[in-house]
C-alpha cells in the first residue's frame, strides 16, 4: 500500500513539474530553458557571483546543444547593480551583455520610485537594450515563475 501511494506521489510530482514548465516552453521563443535570478543586496561579490552563475549556466546548456534564457532581477539594495552612477560591476556589465545576449536584466520600478522619493532625483540606470525597468521586482519573479521559469537565488 505504501509503495503504491509513493508511486502516485512520484507520478504526481513528475506531472506537476511537467505542467510547471509548459508555459515558458510553449512561448516558442527558441529557448528550451528559462531561469530567473535575483539580486537584492548591494554586495559586489553577490553581483559577480550571479553574473558568473548565469554565464556558467549558459555554457552548460550550450554544451548540450540547448539554449537558456536568463533574467536577472535587481531590486531593493540590489538595484545598485544596474545604476550607472554606483554599480560596482558596471565595467563587467558592459562586456557581459555583449558576450551573453541570452541574459537580460530587470530593474525594479518600485525601488526606483522609493529612491526618487527619498533623494529627490531618479537614480540613473545603465543604458542597454538588455536592461529594462519592470513595475516591481518581486512581481517580476512571481510572474516568471507562473510562466514556468526556474528560480535561482545565488
Image: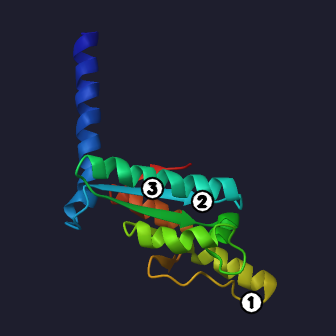
Q: Earlier in the sequence, mark 1 or mark 2?
A: 2
Q: Residue at x 68, y 72 (%)?
A: 87
In the rendered image, residue 10, in percent from the top left (x then y), is placed at: 27, 27
Identify the residue under disc 2.
39
Q: Is residue 75 visible?
A: yes
Write the residue at 33% across / 60% down. 147
* Relative depth, front residue between 23 and 28: 28
As drawn, the residue found furthest toward the top would be 1
- Read off the residue under disc 3: 55
Which of pointers 3 and 2 lies earlier in the amino acid sequence?
2
Q: Secondary structure at mark 1?
A: loop
Q: Using the image as rendered, state which of residue 66 and residue 77 is in the foreground.
A: 66
* Front residue of this view, candidates 74 and 87: 87
| Colour style of the rendered protein structure | rainbow
Q: Quick one: which residue is furthest to the bottom in this view?
A: 121
Q: Is residue 17 left or right of residue 72?
A: left
Picture quadrant of residue 81: bottom right
Q: Is residue 68 above or below residue 83?
A: above
Q: Quadrant of the N terminus?
A: top left
**Rendered position, 112 above or below 37:** below
- In three-dimensional space, the C-alpha distance between marks 1 and 3, rounded to whole angstroms, equals 33 Å
Quarter-wise, where is residue 41 in the image?
bottom right
Q: Position of residue 102 (x, y in %)?
A: 37, 66
Residue visible at 28% across and 11% down in the picture:
2
Label 1–label 2 contact, CB within 8 A: no
Q: Please name the residue that numbered disc 1 is placed on.
A: 121
Amino acid at each position: 500500500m505504501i509503495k503504491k501511494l509513493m508511486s502516485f506521489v512520484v507520478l504526481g510530482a513528475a506531472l506537476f513539474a511537467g505542467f510547471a514548465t509548459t508555459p515558458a516552453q510553449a512561448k516558442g521563443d527558441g529557448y528550451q530553458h528559462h531561469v530567473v535570478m535575483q539580486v537584492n543586496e548591494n554586495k559586489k561579490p553577490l553581483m559577480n557571483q550571479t553574473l558568473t552563475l548565469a554565464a556558467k549556466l549558459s555554457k552548460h546548456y550550450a554544451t548540450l546543444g540547448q539554449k537558456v534564457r536568463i533574467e536577472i532581477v535587481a531590486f531593493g539594495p540590489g538595484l545598485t547593480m544596474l545604476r550607472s552612477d554606483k554599480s560596482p560591476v558596471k565595467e563587467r556589465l558592459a562586456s557581459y551583455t555583449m558576450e551573453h545576449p541570452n541574459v537580460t536584466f530587470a530593474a525594479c520600478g518600485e525601488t526606483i520610485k522609493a529612491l526618487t522619493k527619498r533623494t529627490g532625483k531618479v537614480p540613473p540606470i545603465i543604458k542597454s537594450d538588455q536592461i529594462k525597468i519592470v513595475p516591481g521586482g518581486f512581481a517580476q519573479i512571481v510572474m516568471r515563475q507562473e510562466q514556468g521559469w526556474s528560480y535561482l537565488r545565488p
